[in-house]
Image (tube, coloured by chain):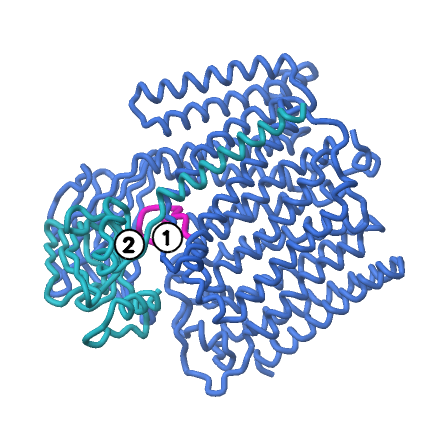
Chain colours: A blue, B cyan
């Protein structure tokens, strides 16, 4: 038996089990018989096992250097280190789709085990199986990684060198796909809710799925940003590149959904918004793949070259048609009864979701606008970072304002406590901004400092209010705080996520405003200052690392030790790749890049130094955010949705 | 009560519209070749553009100590002198397709971002190439 044989057959079986599962879900709907659901669950399990075997077959081929299938022949090299060989599975399109299908079949199975609502189950299962069918059709007929190669090569080119350059690239896609696939479960429930006309409970039922998916998307974006920072050698973490935008759009829409879902869960309002947001968020995960994998970003003309682009576009349109088609049908039944005050928690939650949706719209527009211009006028234009920064800055300010006030306000209407807190918060905002201006920071940075202080005060007021309740029943403030954390772990997690976001905003504001970028040519042994920092070029040497060739220029930075920026030459790449060296300190990052060196005699090297303040805190903020998510989703923190509770509209 | 929401809605929509169209209008960066610039200098004056073409043989002057790079970019029909402060990228050489991002100041193009357009199959164009050939070459090299 060969990996190709095993892989192909397991894909066929996975596809068959998926189609059978789809048939059983339809049967359950038709016959109104729960036995079909039980059988459907088995089909989901079998489809997952078959996909796992296919995954194993491809790893088998990669780890044993079997070049008889197209995926290894095109993307694998015997010279790669073992971890790169393993991660090569998701380094290119076909393998990525296989990984995606693996996660989808896993999530379909997990969701099928938790089906509680007799009326909704067939449609939930059916929708998930339908999504899964799409991936297996793509895998079997368009991007099959197991296609046999008539004359297997002795060695292949290996994965894209950029991906081999950092271990983070092995992690980032996995997190991304887990986030993408996670959005399919709430979407399937939304579809089922609209089909079975049971509009209220699905948001509470899928809360866990939504939040874990959000956590994975957040982690994936952070991992991508960190990878870009450590590998790409320009000293930045975010470039508004279409590929980055593709991962950001689903995140923004999922964030909008998380906020309005809370309103529906607690107050029964905003059902229409939730159906719309989850449809858009799930569609955005498909849009992302369409944008990055069809080549359409480079040029509209690349679109028609492969089958992947049109297939994903078709599926994207299908998702939108199903979501909005159903919504149009049930729209009149789910109008909000009564009116919602805007200056209340639900009002600000809705407001923040509108801000996030607008951000998503801006990113979609900025990413697609060059395509529209090219299609209409033939002019080639690009929309650079200035556009995104210009549109995002005011939106981010509104978002940070709402973020502080939102969780503080009670449901329904204002009370005295939150009114007092708001006054103090606004005073702190003004004071913080003024202080920043007096220090001499730019207006944007000063305003962000003010907003940071405003949010910290807001968090203090919210926690203080809850802890004060426990203080009456416990010994001291310490045990009152512990009691609060224990009993309100979920809401405390939410506040921690907010703190992570506002800390990230602060880090972004400083790092964008006060970045210093300079370069200089140094002789070996020469001491000089770059951007005011005393440095010394110690040496210039070359290494043969078997799968690559590296040139290294050790540079001593005054007081910070030796940094070792490299240029790396891969056999498959004509351009060397940067191997920047970063010295992280609490308030400033020193980022060194070897730009060029003396090829003849090894006597000089051109060193670029980028000094960026506060970047370290961006990664800290990311970790804080993820800890907050964990506090929400880990078992124990979630009160189980009781039927009586979730069914009642308050 | 209703008209209040309507006015609020219009204000929000207006703000979003301003953000988007105001932002796009100012920040569109056109990709052109030297002859397209010469044909329509007024349109591109003072604007950020991406200038694509080939590095003219014999025009490259680089001083590693001052990091000043000067060369001439050509599309076969017209040529433009380029000034760029920074190290030339690894594959930067004569007859290579490049894209420089920056602005015109007088007759000289001041670049702050220099990209070499290369691909595994890259070949320097034959003698007598046209701006269309150059454009295609650069587009394919993406």
Identify the residue at image location x=28%, y=47%. B48
Is residue A360 visible in the rendered image? The answer is: yes
Chain under callout 1: A
Where residue A378 appears, x then y in whole percent?
A: 39, 60
SS state under label 2? strand
In the image, taking residue A261 as reference, residue A383 lies left or right, namely left
Q: How many numbered tags mark residues here?
A: 2
Q: Quadrant of the N terminus of chain A?
A: bottom right
SS state under label 1? strand
Region rendered in magenta: A228-241
| Residue identifier under label 1 | A382
Q: Is residue A316 magenta?
A: no
Question: Closer to the camera, A327 or A623?
Answer: A327
Where residue A368 appears, x then y in whole percent?
A: 47, 53
Identify the residue at image location x=53%, y=57%. A174
In the image, taking residue A37 as reference, residue A349 lies left or right, namely left
Q: Is residue A236 magenta?
A: yes
Identify the residue at image location x=24%, y=54%. B40
| Residue identifier under label 2 | B50
Where residue A256 appears, x then y in whole percent?
A: 59, 40
Within 10 Å of the Cα at label 1, are there few (<14), some (14-19), or many (20+) other Cα atoms? Answer: many
In the image, taking residue A535 as reference, residue A34 lies left or right, namely right
Q: Main secondary structure of the magenta part?
A: loop
Residue A567, image quadrant: bottom left
User: In whole angstroms, how far apart are the C-alphas of marks 2 and 1?
Assistant: 9 Å
- Would you say the residues marked 2 and 1 are in contact, meaning their CB atoms lie under 8 Å apart? yes
Identify the residue at image location x=58%, y=41%. A255
């Amino acid at each position: 038996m060969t990996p190709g044989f095993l892989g192909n057959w397991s894909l066929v079986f996975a596809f068959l089990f998926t189609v059978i599962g789809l048939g059983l879900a339809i049967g359950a709907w038709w016959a109104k018989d729960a036995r079909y659901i039980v059988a459907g669950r088995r089909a989901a399990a079998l489809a997952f096992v078959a996909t796992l075997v296919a995954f194993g077959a491809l790893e088998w081929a990669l780890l044993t250097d079997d070049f008889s299938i197209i995926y290894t022949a095109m993307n694998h090299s015997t010279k790669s280190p073992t971890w790169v060989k393993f991660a090569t599975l998701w380094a290119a399109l076909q393998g990525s789709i296989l990984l995606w299908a693996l996660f989808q079949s896993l999530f379909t199975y997990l969701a099928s085990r938790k089906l509680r609502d007799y009326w909704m189950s067939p449609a939930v299962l059916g929708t998930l199986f339908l999504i899964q069918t799409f991936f297996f059709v793509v895998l079997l007929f368009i991007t099959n990684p197991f296609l046999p190669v008539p004359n297997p090569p002795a060695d292949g080119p290996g994965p894209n060198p950029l991906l081999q350059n950092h271990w983070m690239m092995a992690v980032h896609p996995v997190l991304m796909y887990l986030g993408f696939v996670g959005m399919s479960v709430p979407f399937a429930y939304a579809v089922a809710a609209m089909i079975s006309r049971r509009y209220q409970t699905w948001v509470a039922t899928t809360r866990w799925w939504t939040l874990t998916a959000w956590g994975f998307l957040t982690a994936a974006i952070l991992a991508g940003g960190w990878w870009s920072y450590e590998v790409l050698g320009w000293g930045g973490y975010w470039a508004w590149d279409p590929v980055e935008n593709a991962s950001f759009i689903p995140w923004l829409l999922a964030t909008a959904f998380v906020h309005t879902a809370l309103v529906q869960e607690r107050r029964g309002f905003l059902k229409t918004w939730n159906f719309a947001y989850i449809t858009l968020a799930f569609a955005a995960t498909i849009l992302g793949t369409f944008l990055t994998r069809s080549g359409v970003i480079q040029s509209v003309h690349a679109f028609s070259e492969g089958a992947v682009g049109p297939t994903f576009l078709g599926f994207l349109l299908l998702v939108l048609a199903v979501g909005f088609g159903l919504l149009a049908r049930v729209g009149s039944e789910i109008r909000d009864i009564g009116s919602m005050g805007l200056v209340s928690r639900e009002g600000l939650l809705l407001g923040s979701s509108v801000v996030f949706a607008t951000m998503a719209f801006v990113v979609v527009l900025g990413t697609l606008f060059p395509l529209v211009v090219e299609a209409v006028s033939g002019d080639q234009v690009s929309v650079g970072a200035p556009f995104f920064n210009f549109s995002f800055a005011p939106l981010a300010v509104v978002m940070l304002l709402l973020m502080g006030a939102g969780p503080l306000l009670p449901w329904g209407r204002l009370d005295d406590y939150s009114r007092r807190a708001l006054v103090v918060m606004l005073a702190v905002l003004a004071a913080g901004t003024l202080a920043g201006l007096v220090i001499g920071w730019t207006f944007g940075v000063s305003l962000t400092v003010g907003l940071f202080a405003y949010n910290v005060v807001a968090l203090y007021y919210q926690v203080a209010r809850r802890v004060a309740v426990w203080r009456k029943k416990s010994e001291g403030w310490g045990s009152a705080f512990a009691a609060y954390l224990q009993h309100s772990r979920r809401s405390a997690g939410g506040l921690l996520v907010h703190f992570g976001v506002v800390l990230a905003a602060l880090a972004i504001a400083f790092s964008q405003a006060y970045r210093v970028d300079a370069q200089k040519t140094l002789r070996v042994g020469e001491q000089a200052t770059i951007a005011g920092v005393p440095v010394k070029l110690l040496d210039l040497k070359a290494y043969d690392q078997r799968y690559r060739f590296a040139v290294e220029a050790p540079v001593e930075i005054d007081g910070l030790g030796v940094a070792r920026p490299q240029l790396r030459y891969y056999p498959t790449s004509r351009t060397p790749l940067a191997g920047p060296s970063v010295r992280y300190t609490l308030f400033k990052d020193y980022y060194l890049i070897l730009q060029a060196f003396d090829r003849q005699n090894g006597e000089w090297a051109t060193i670029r130094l980028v000094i960026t303040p506060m970047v370290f805190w961006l990664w800290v903020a990311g970790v804080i955010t993820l800890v907050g998510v964990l506090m929400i989703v880990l078992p124990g923190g979630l009160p189980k949705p009781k039927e009586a509770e979730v069914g009642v509209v308050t | 009560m209703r008209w209040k929401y309507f006015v609020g809605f219009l204000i929000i929509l207006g703000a979003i519209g301003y953000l988007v169209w105001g932002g796009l209008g100012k920040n569109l960066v056109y990709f052109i070749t030297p002859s397209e610039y010469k044909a329509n200098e007024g349109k591109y004056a003072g604007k950020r553009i991406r200038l694509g073409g080939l590095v003219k043989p014999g025009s490259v002057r680089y001083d590693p100590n001052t990091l000043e790079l000067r060369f001439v970019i050509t599309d076969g029909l017209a040529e433009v002198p380029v000034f760029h402060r920074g190290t030339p990228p690894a594959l930067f050489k004569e007859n290579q397709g490049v894209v420089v991002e920056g602005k015109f100041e007088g007759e000289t193009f001041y670049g702050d971002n220099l990209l070499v357009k290369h691909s595994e199959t890259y070949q320097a164009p034959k003698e007598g190439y046209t701006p269309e050939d150059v454009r295609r070459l650069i587009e394919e090299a993406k």
